[in-house]
Amino acid sequence: MLKIIDSPLFGILLSLICFEIGCYLNKKYKIAILNPLLISQLLIIFVLLKFNISYESYSKGGDFISFFLGPATVILAVPLYKKLALLKRNALAIILGIVAGSFTGIICIILLSYALGLDMTIVKSLAPKSVTVPIGVEITKQLNGIPSITVVSIIITGIIGSIIAPFICKVFKIKDKVSMGIAIGTASHALGTTKAMELGETEGAMSSLSIGLAGLITVFLVPIVIKILGFFINI
């Protein structure tokens, strides 16, 4: 039994089984809060705590799955290619929207962290919360933040975004498919994009584009914004 737990296969199988359970519950009850990723995380935590299994044992397989995050993100370019003509027609508006969304997200998290009195290391770790994990972790490392906090904040941001995005669009009567896709992708990266794809092909394509551009923009903006705000507030 111990040999199985200490092998990478354990972490892989546990992750896949818990995620499939999450997908089943999501499809059966069709409740937004029953997000497959959220359900799978809670189930994995429960199993590890219930059977007193160390995170290190689980991560041998979990890290193997994480390795494919980068390549999996690239696949999201497929629906974007199908909507290339639409992208060209709205190029300026799309780029400005992503820049505005990225900048607003960074400013909000830094100011909120300051208002809550969080340590500067925490602020740096939370700043790249709206980009994919591979990009966010690299940004945090460059800023001497804590990668594990960044990963958690990115996952939480994505889950919340995928759950409330349709509701927000409905409340504010946002019906333009390009606008919906850009907003969801910029605010909640790949997890939000999965929801955007459920809404429609155009929304999914625009959200896919936002992931890459928002990540690139965030790489440049986060260090600059933190440095500039540092002159005006004590962070």
Image (cartoon, rainbow, N blue to C red):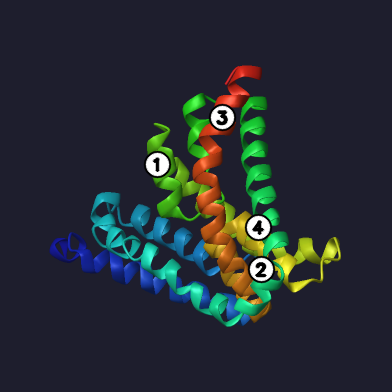
Residue that appears at 74% across and 73% down: 177
- Residue underneath mark 3: 226
Of 116 and 20, the residue lying toward us: 116
Amino acid found under the numbered disc labelled 3: Ile
Position of 228 relative to 134 (above/below) = above
Q: Secondary structure at mark 2?
A: loop
Q: Earlier in the sequence, mark 1 or mark 2?
A: 2
| Contact (Cβ within 8 Å) of mark 4 with mark 1 | no
Q: Earlier in the sequence, mark 4 or mark 1?
A: 4
- Residue underneath mark 2: 32
Amino acid found under the numbered disc labelled 2: Ala
Q: Nearer the viewer, mark 2 or mark 4?
A: 4
Q: Say the numbered circle drawn on residue 147.
A: 1
Q: Earlier in the sequence, mark 2 or mark 3?
A: 2
Residue 209 x %, y %: 57, 66
Q: Secondary structure at mark 4?
A: helix
State the image quarter where residue 97 is shown. bottom right
Direction from residue 233 to residue 75 in the image, left or right: left
Position of 234 relative to 186 (above/below) = above
**Real-space Cα distance between discs 2 and 4?**
29 Å
Q: Nearer the viewer, mark 4 or mark 1?
A: 4
Q: Nearer the viewer, mark 3 or mark 4?
A: 4
Packing grade of label 1 (10 A; few <14, some 14-19, many >=20) is some
Q: Secondary structure at mark 1?
A: helix
Packing grade of label 4 (10 A; few <14, some 14-19, many >=20) is some
Residue 30 x %, y %: 66, 77
Direction from residue 62 to residue 128 in the image, left or right: right
**Real-space Cα distance between discs 1 and 3?**
17 Å
Direction from residue 134 to residue 105 in the image, left or right: right
- Residue underneath mark 4: 95
Residue 26 x %, y %: 58, 75
Q: Say the numbered circle drawn on residue 10.
A: none
